[in-house]
């Protein structure tokens, strides 16, 4: 339940209009936040007993979800843009978490 809720919260956070967020650069607070969100996501999903031995699948699914969140931001009708560096931070967080 906690892993599913966290996944939904990440998607919700990625939906916030971009003008509400500060402008950030490489190694900025924004990138640390992305890495942290996905690290927690990995820990929650690998902590599920049925998935604990499936960490490779969790890693692949998490990296795919990280890519989706960036693509999804490009689809939103308000000021959100995909950022390859955010995807990298998401992937680093997932890798660290598993």
Image (cartoon, grey):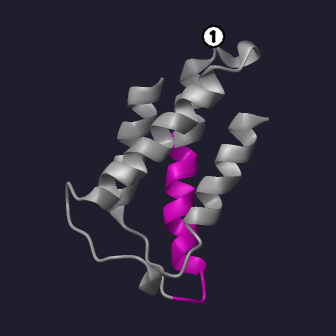
Crowd tier of the residue under label 1, counting other residues whose Cα lies within 10 Å: few below 14, some 14–19, many 20 or above: few
Write down the quadrant of residue 91 in the picture.
Answer: top left
Establish if 92 lies above or below 27: above
User: At 51% across and 77% down in the image, what residue appears?
Assistant: 74
Q: How many marks?
A: 1
Question: Is 25 positioned to the left or the right of 78 in the image?
Answer: left
Give residue 71's position: percent from left, percent from top.
52, 67
> Which secondary structure class fits the magenta region best?
helix
Segment tinted magenta in the rendering: 63-78
Establish if 88 lies above or below 43: below
User: At 64% across and 29% down in the image, what residue appears?
Assistant: 45
Establish if 77 lies above or below 33: below
User: At 57% across and 20% down in the image, what residue appears?
Assistant: 55
Farthest residue to the right: give it: 1
Judging from the image, what secondary structure is the residue with disc 1 in?
A: loop
Quadrant containing the N terminus in the rendered view: top right
User: At 73% across and 13% down in the image, what residue appears?
Assistant: 49
Question: Is 39 positioned to the left or the right of 75 in the image?
Answer: left
In terms of depth relative to the viewer, which is nearer, 23 or 69? 23
Residue beneath label 1, please? 53
Give residue 24's position: percent from left, percent from top.
26, 70
Give residue 35's position: percent from left, percent from top.
39, 45
């Amino acid at each position: 339940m906690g892993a599913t809720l966290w996944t939904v919260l990440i998607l919700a956070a990625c939906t916030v209009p971009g003008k509400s967020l500060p402008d950030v650069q490489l190694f900025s607070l924004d990138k640390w936040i992305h890495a942290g969100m996905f690290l927690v996501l990995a820990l929650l999903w690998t902590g599920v007993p049925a998935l604990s031995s499936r960490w490779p699948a969790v890693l692949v699914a998490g990296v795919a979800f990280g890519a989706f969140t960036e693509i999804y931001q490009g689809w939103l009708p308000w000021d959100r843009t995909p950022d390859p560096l955010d995807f990298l931070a998401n992937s680093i967080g997932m890798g660290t978490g598993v």
